[in-house]
Each structure stands twice: as structure tokens, then as C-alpha cells.
Amino acid sequence: MRTLLLSLLGLTAALPAQDIVIYGGTSGGITAAIQAAREGRTAVLIEPTKFLGGLTTGGLGATDIGNKKAIGGISREFYTAVGSYYADDQKWVHQTREAYFSKRPHGNAADEGTMWTFEPHVASAIYDRMLKAAGDKVTVVFGERLDLKKGVIKDGTRIVKIVMESGREFSGKMFIDATYEGDLMAKAGVSYHVGREANATYGETLNGVQVGHAKSHQFKVEVDPYIKKGDPASGLLPGIEKEIPGPDGAGDRKVQAYNFRMCTTDVPENRRDWEKPANYDERWYELALRNVEAGEDRLSWAPTPMPNRKTDTNNNFAISTDFIGQNWDYAEADYATRAKIWQAHEDWQKGLMWTYAYHPRVPEKMRLAFQKLGLAKDEFKDNGNWPRQLYVREARRMISDYVMSEKNCRRVEVVEDSVGMGAYNMDSHHIQRFVTKEGFVRNEGDVQVGSKPYPVSYRSLRPKASECTNLLVPVCLSASHIAYGSIRMEPVFMVMGQSAATAAGLAIEGNTSIQAIDYGALKERLLANGQMLDFVTTAAAGGGHGLDKTKLPGIVVDDTDATLKGFEQTGHVSGNFVGDSYRHDGNADKGAMAARFTPALPKAGSYRVAISYSPNANRATNVPVTIHHAQGETKVFVNQKLAPKGEAPFHVVGTFEFTAGKDGWVEIGNAGTDGHVIVDAVQWLPAKR
């Protein structure tokens, strides 16, 4: 790997034409460069900033992916390298390996020696080592960014070269846009979309405006939105929209919220106290202060444990690190405007942390909790310990011949030209705040609905042939808003980057366009490189995580067949469960959720009733379960921290008499619970007499 700070060296001799020009040093750009080198190609990796790795090295150490079996190739090599690093006891400075995994029993440590939680500096070191192993085939260029006015030179549908603001030019046979923003794609004349499509566009149910689905990360108390409480004429507090959202399912140009994934610690000697920004404007935090004064007692952040008593701290609840509604112009903005938006996000989040930790209007118990954690002094030393990467969850999304949609995530539509897999929930963060007709504040845009691991189409990585024939887009790929919410995970970007470089290599070999390569040859090469292209998740009873209810004894009603009020968040990474996933309440909206399971019993009699759940340290100890049977109703409480008493994952709650048909039911709620409540399935097994 050769490293050039070209923007600092000035206009020296041009770099020779490369086989593959990769713009964007994100995780996907890095794997593309490595794959190019492994195939004997020359590649230049151009990163506009001074660091590589995007979010993977920028604070997102709690890897989001879901079923990790979906990840192969160089991406899995990375997580295997993380596992090898932390297998060394000497790497555990502030805690032992055993202490860490005792608090994270599933630990984001998977099979085959992989590990999926890590410190930012560890990720940087691993990427550097992997790129050095690629040798001189890869040249890394820092500090150069695309000229947004005349940065792409084409001959017909082929890109000939790209031009930086400095005037530097990079020519090549194939080009890959691996940025989070999709600038190269856009300036090459490729079609794209910003915002949410209407549900009708691709036949979806979770796209567009989602007031009805927006139940998570929501206000649990009534908060006045006006500058002068109760006076609409005084105007709205900052960050609240004047217009109410359109009808559910309607499209718009609005974008889900961004934030920074902070690396914090509770180790006193390594902890930096929260500091009040010099430009702190209390008006921006009035809504948060009113929220806690109205009774919000939840800690509005989500610190996931990382090794060495650090965290990856993300957004949580109604007013947290997401700067809702303040990023809508980012995707298509010029660099100066983006810099202002970026800085506004940083100022907001730093100010929010100081507010929760020190403002006198915040209850003391909450202040002390926020003071316990602070930025880790040994991370991001060149940036005041603040993450170097804004979490650009979504910007431009290409529109190609094939657009990945909700149908793919649900496996209603399964593509046959897979280049890798997605496996995360269909996930969208909130997009806007508005005032309800009752005169209180609500968030809108959050969606968290389970998906099944699914293949991602090669056609979603390359533009229409009429627009560009030598460009691949593994990050801002062709997907609807809600499908992108599942695909947009760092391990998947790594997979897509490697697959894009593999396809580019085939196009070079065949002297053809990226649209005309033989998919059979691509598939063969991807499999040889260890990529996972597809698998089916549901296992037979007793094997794997997902249990097939048709192979279980008795009558089993899964959560997909239950009548639900809330419980829209899904999971599939912890313990055994029935079907493709389980549901949970996110430890929120206590008393507002219920799941009723109604069986069709073939005959009257005595049945042993059991509920399915996966135990974990964050579960509730007092989950209310109501059994409606022939003699009336019985209410029991289940400790979901403990292993089920029965054949896992089923916990027996009792034996009861039932009439034939659908008169009986079991309802699981979350009223008064002290942790996460899991709902998965209920089993009725004829009792032995």
C-alpha cells in the first residue's frame, strides 16, 4: 500500500491510469481496494478526509447486522481479526476478557473466532494491516475530494477520469463510488433518489410517512411545543416542524436522522468530562428539559459495552443524540453547506450531553448517570476524542434497473443474482418532530420491523446501461428507503465493496461493460472468495436458532399470528426462538403493549401452556402473562432473566382446562415491567392424565 497526501504535495506528476479508481475510504471502499489487489489489479483508493474506515473506525463498534452467518469474504476476515486481537489477554487493560463477556453473554462474539464489538483504534489498526498486505497494487490518497461542478469526465457512457477540487485527475478502466453521499454516482449522471418513496412506488407497506409505526424512541409524556407554553402565537421551539406529516405511506424528500456514535468510558483516569460548547444555545435544549420535567425518567442514550470498559453510545428514546430533522439538505449540498450541517450535529450532541449531565433542571439521579460516562481519552486523540465520522445513515440512493425493496427483505421476492446478503431489521430512525392535534410533540419516521436474511442483487450495484457502463456503487446502492434501512450496515458495505471490485475485475478481463458481465462467472468467483450469497434461516425443531413451529409438539401460535398492540421491534440474535425472530418492547412504553395468542384447539381438555422467550441479563423479571381458560383467567409473572423451565425456549406457566375452538387465549404485556419484555410464541400441549 502506498500512501499519498496529494493535496498537500500539490500538483505533482499524475498517478498512472489505474485498473480501478475507488472514491471513498469507507469500509466498502477498503474491501474493494483489497479485493482488487488480490486479483492482481491496480487500484487507487481516494479518501477526502485524513482517515480511513468511515463508521467502522469512527465509533460504530457495536456491529449492527442480525444473523452473522450472512457475512462472508473480507468482511468476515475483518471480524475474525477482531476476535484474534481480543483473544490476547494483554489487550485487556481496563477489564478482563472474562469480565466483559460475563456482562455480554452473547457478546457480539459469534462462531469461528469472530468478534463483533471493538474499540475504534483497533478497527483502524486492522484496516491498516489489511491494506498493507495488499502491497503496492493499492495506492491510498488522502485529502482529495471530487470537484462537484466538473469532477466527472465521460466519453459516452464511460467515465474516463475524475477531477478533484485541487485539479488532480485520476483515470481508470473501472470506477467505484464507495462514499456515504454518492457524489461520484450523481455527478456521473446516474439516477438517484433522496428521501422516502411512497409505499405505492414499489408495492411496500413500511415506506413513506410512518406516524402509525412511530412508537419506539417516542415521547411517553405530554410536552408543550411552544416557546411560551400554551401559546401557539409565540411560535414553536427549535427542531419542531410547522407542518404535520402527510398521510401514512406518502412519499417525501426527508431523510432519517444522523448522529455521532460516541466512544465513552466509565474509567475515571480515561474519562473526559462533558464540556459545554462555546456556542451553547439553551433554546435548542428547552424541549429536552421540558421532557424530563414532565416525567421522562429514562436515560436518553444507548451505551453498548465495548472491550476495556468503553461503549458505543447511540441514540435512544424521544430526545437523544439523533439531531432529528436537521439533515434533510445534506445529501445534495455543496461541501460548505455539508460542513455547517456536520458542525451543527456535533454542537447539538455535545450540548445535549452537557445538558443531561449538568443542567440544574435535570433531576440529580439522571445527571449523575450521565456524568458516569465520558469520552474515552485514548480514542480519536487528533479530534478532541470526538468521533471523526458523522453517521450518515442515508443520503442518495441509486435508481438502477432493479431496486431492492421491502419484498426482498421479507423474502417475498428473492433475486437470483446475489452478490451478498442483508440480515438486519428494516430500520429507520425518526425523520421529523411535529405537533399533534392535541397540541403536544411527537416524533415521526421510526420503523423497526424484522426481516429474514436475504440476497442482494448485483443489479442494485450498477447503474442503468444508458447512464454509465463502468461504475459500481456498493454503498449508495439501488434500494428503497426501507430496504436500505436493512442493507445499510457496515459488514454489508464491506461485502458489497468486495463484490463490486470482483465484478469490475471481470469487466476488465472481458473488455466489456459492468452490465454485460456473465453473472455465472461472477457467482463462481464470489463463492471462491468466501462470500455468502444465500441461505434459509428456519431450522428444524431443536436445531439452530429459528424453530419451525410445524415441527414442534402441540399447538404453537407464533408472534406473527398474534394480535399485537405495540411490540413492533424484532430480534433474532439471542438464544432460540420460534420462526424467524422474536419481538420485544425495547424496554419502553410500559403498559402500552400487549400480544394476544389465540389457538384453534381441536378438542376440549387439559393443556399445558408454555411461552417462548430467550433469557438475557437485560430482560424483565416480572413479565405479566394472562391465561384465559375455561374456568376464568389466571395471571402469572415470569422472570425472563432466568432460563425457561421446560424444553427451551418454552417456559411452562401452568396447566389449564380449555374448551374446543378459539375461546381461550394467552396475553403477554409489559405493564410495570423492569426490563425488556420478549414475546415469541405460545404452546398448548395436551396434558397427560
Image: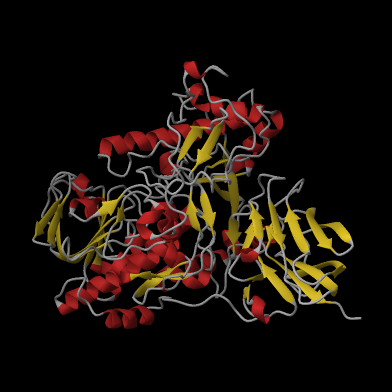
Identified at 46% across, 30% down, the residue is 239
Q: Where is residue 459 shown, x and y percent of the image?
A: 29, 68
Q: Nearer the viewer, residue 457 or 687?
A: 687
Say above or below: 244 vs 450: above
Say above or below: 121 vs 35: above
Split into 4 quadrants, where in the image is the C terminus?
Answer: bottom right
Say above or below: 309 vs 483: above
Locate residue 222 relative to residue 650 in the image: left or right: left
Locate residue 635 relative to residue 18 in the image: left or right: right
Split into 4 quadrants, where in the image is the N terminus?
Answer: bottom left
Q: Where is residue 287 shown, x and y percent of the image?
A: 55, 28
Q: Where is residue 612 shown, x and y percent of the image?
A: 72, 67
Locate residue 559 relative to residue 507 in the image: left or right: right
Q: Nearer the viewer, residue 240 or 533?
A: 240
Q: Residue furthest right?
A: 689
Does residue 242 appear anywhere in the picture? yes
Q: Nearer the viewer, residue 558 or 288?
A: 558
Identified at 59% across, 47% down, the residue is 303
> How many labels sit on residues?
0
Q: Nearer the viewer, residue 278 or 617?
A: 617
Say above or below: 150 vs 286: below
**How are the colours assigned in the image?**
secondary structure
Q: Where is residue 370 shown, x and y percent of the image?
A: 63, 36
Give the image quarter of residue 541. bottom right
Does residue 307 appear anywhere in the picture? no
